[in-house]
Amino acid sequence: MQAGDLPRPVAAGDALLAPVGLGSTEVENLRWSDDFALPYGCDGGVLAIAIAANGDIYLGGGFRSCANVMASGLVRYDRALDQWTAVASTEGEGVQGYVTALAIDGDSLYVAGGFEQVQVGSPVAAANVAKFDLLTEQWSPLASATGNGVDGEVRAMALDEDGHLYLAGLFAQANVGSPISAPGLARWDAGMQQWSTPGTPPAGGGYHALIWHQNHLIAGGPGGIRIWSADSGWRTHGGPNGVVYALAATGSDIYAGGYWMQIFAGTDTTIDSGGIGRWSMNEERWFGVGDGLQRTFTESPQVNALAIHDGKLIAGGFFFSSGGTTPVQGYHLLSWNLSAEHWETVDSQLGSGAGGAVSAIATDGPDVLLGGGFGFLGPPEAPTRAYRFGIWRSDLNLWEGSDAGEGQPLIGGAGELTELNGTIYAIGSFGQAGDVPVKSLAQWNGSTWDRVGTVDNEGGFELTAIHAFQGKIYLSGRFSADSGPGLLSGVRLVSWDPASGDWQSIGEFGNDPPEDFPLIYAIKSIGDDLYVGGYFRNVTDQQGTVNTSYLARWNVTTGQWSPVGNDGEGVSQFVSSMVAVGTDLYVGGSFAEVNLGSSPVTAHGVARWDGSQWHSLTDSTGEGTSGVYSLASDGDFLYVGGRFTAVAGVNLPALRVARWRLDGGGWEAMSGGIGNPSPFGNVDFVFSLAAVGDWIYAAGRFDGVENDSVSVNNIARRHRDGGSWRSVGSGVEPSFSAGGIGNLLAVGEDLYASGQFWLAGNRSSFNIASYATRGELDLTITGNGGGRVSSDPSGLNCTDSCSARFEWDQPIVLTAQPFASSQFVGWSGDCSGTGSCVVDFDRARFVGAEFASQSDLFADDFE
């Protein structure tokens, strides 16, 4: 749906009072930017590939978007046009889960995996398998009158010559609703619309691979393969001391790939053929495939996919080379020459392969199509960008990726953000920012990413905190000697000057005992002082070592380190967050005391340093809390977030977020709070808070607010004057179960979020996102008369066309005042009538105001 398709307010007499559902999820999603979309490949692993007769390529997997096209688990790629489209007429449709197997029979695309519904948006019930009609673009379940699909995950599918569809997986029954026993193997007859099993499958199930070859159905799973034919029934052929995940066949040879080190080939006979083996249907025995494959000397290789192509067996998975004494290096992808019987890389370049695990292989004429969890294909020194999907073109001897779409993603998790002179600086575990190779540090100018400085920092940034201070960028983390000129090894605070490009090491942090690894979690500044908090006990520079106890202060003028305390030092446990409010520094963490030494101050989890003395946050009900991860302030309140369920001792229930009145008024709960109300075994966290305008935003890892009664996605907001917590559109969807938002940064009207996620506002946004907290109201004044239009709240006050920006989700009242010689004719656009205009400001709005000259109006009366 486009912005123009959304409903608008309609006039009701002279007053416009027709809201459209204040801040609906669909409308709020328009406030999330797609600047950081993944413009190429897919944002999650590709696990299955199928090719239609017209050349369209279908990919299935665990992704939510491909090349900035919303496509949940299933996408279509037009190779000729380099164009990605969702499967079905509405973008975003696919499966509500993930896809592990695809099969095409004529105009029918069979889709299987782990899901209960297909056609996201207008769901169709389908138990782990469904059919998509390539002509009508309609979904349908595989069902009898009372049944539907299978009762567990499908791992593989195969078709025989008569169009029967066979399924293998982790299920026990088929025809769910009126079930039949199907221990991991089932058959669907499309003509009869009937479920059955191929013969009587052996007990046990748990199959991961399936092919149809020479009138035989071959299934792979724990311990080996099982072969079925209508004439001979089922036969079991054990061998590998692990699990079979992939199968391919040519002639009388069946190749099995999986996770193992050896194959048992008879009594007291083993074959060293890691991850791959060959079963001869003629000789009824197992053979190795050369010396197999190798991951490490102690870890088994894993083969996930096999395919026969141009006289070769292509193997993909998680391994680093072939086995034996003269291994062929090929990361996650190698080729076995069937006639010459040796291993080689697919492109014949030593060390070539995939930059991550390969999970799916398909062939199309001279081309080999690859899917998985990789980010590039080819030799590492000259890689081809191919994010989760790519093609080897054997006839042209080149790798092909996909460059469709637009976006500037961070490829890898994003950590803290800071802003200096309009530039956003990001740290994290990413190795690429947009099109720029980086290592953990990058800068965003509003449209593109760039490196920070000219240093080739591949040598080792492991950054944990960042802060802009007096024209420089301050960074903390673990550095090596080749991190940059002027930098030294160790856990340090360093600075970078954007004007000169110079780096400077400021101090090295240590612990007691020394082997206890130090970490820095937060950096903040007040005046000429820079405060550093984390998990450390001392800091060392050229002047010596200063004991600091988890919190240290560095003065930019004197260049000296000092502890934070009037007659003591620091806090009793680690510091995770800080915020400056005027000349006061508020510190949060897991401590119980501050000002350690002769006169410690009891302060649980949060305390205030006024520049010379420590203070606890105490009122008549108690003080502090525990497990504080984040702090923010709007000038009137200190907002505290973390994992706690109460503040003020235990006297005030407050789920993971609370606020303290800076005027000394005490602690306040914030309505129903964030996350699950149960304190046992929960995994809900508030990692970051930000105050923007009249709203407070909380982000982290949680899926509910208001005592878990309202669903959200890792970010929520609440008006500072009260009310309930509410969603921020569709929020952000983490790229794995432990993902979410780690940091928020408010820059003007925009709120930036960083972490480990792949969607924001139900659109592609890779590990970083921005949300507009305000929108524009455009006013056009027309007619041959004149007048003034003003707004409440203030912002618009003009006699000519103008615009103003307002916070979302409030009524904007516009009043038209004609000049003495004019008359107000009426409103247009998002208002109508002649009275006051009330704009339900939940999205960008346009209003027209027309004024006419009274002389023209009188002239009309005499015509």
Image (cartoon, rainbow, N blue to C red):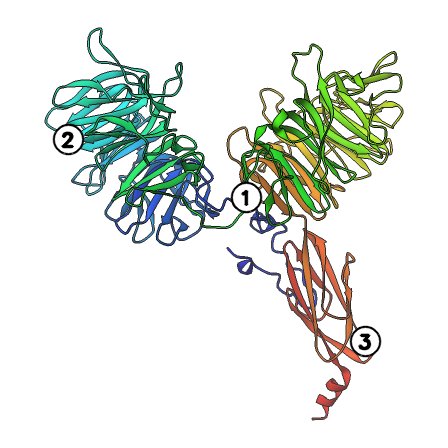
Give the answer, above or below, for where 759 lies relative to 625. Answer: below
Q: Identity of the amino acid at label 1?
A: Gly
Q: From the top left corner, tell me how far across and down residue 281 is, in percent.
A: 14, 23
**In the structure shown, which secondary structural element does the residue marked by tag 3 occupy?**
loop
**The quadrant where residue 657 appears:** top right
Which disc number belongs to residue 434?
1
Q: Which residue, given by chain and number where applicable, does mark 3 sit on?
A: 819
Q: Which residue, given by chain and number where applicable, does mark 2 sit on?
A: 251
Q: Identity of the amino acid at label 2?
A: Gly
User: In front of the other: label 3 or label 1?
Assistant: 1
Q: From the top left corner, tell me how far across and down residue 268 is, in percent.
A: 22, 6
Q: Identity of the amino acid at label 3?
A: Phe
Viewer-proximal residue, 783 or 431?
431
CA distance separating discs 2 and 1: 47 Å
Q: From the top left corner, tell me how far across and down residue 643 is, in percent.
A: 66, 25
Query: Could you classify mark 1 by the number of other residues whose Cα lies within 10 Å: few (under 14), some (14-19), or many (20 or more)?
Result: many
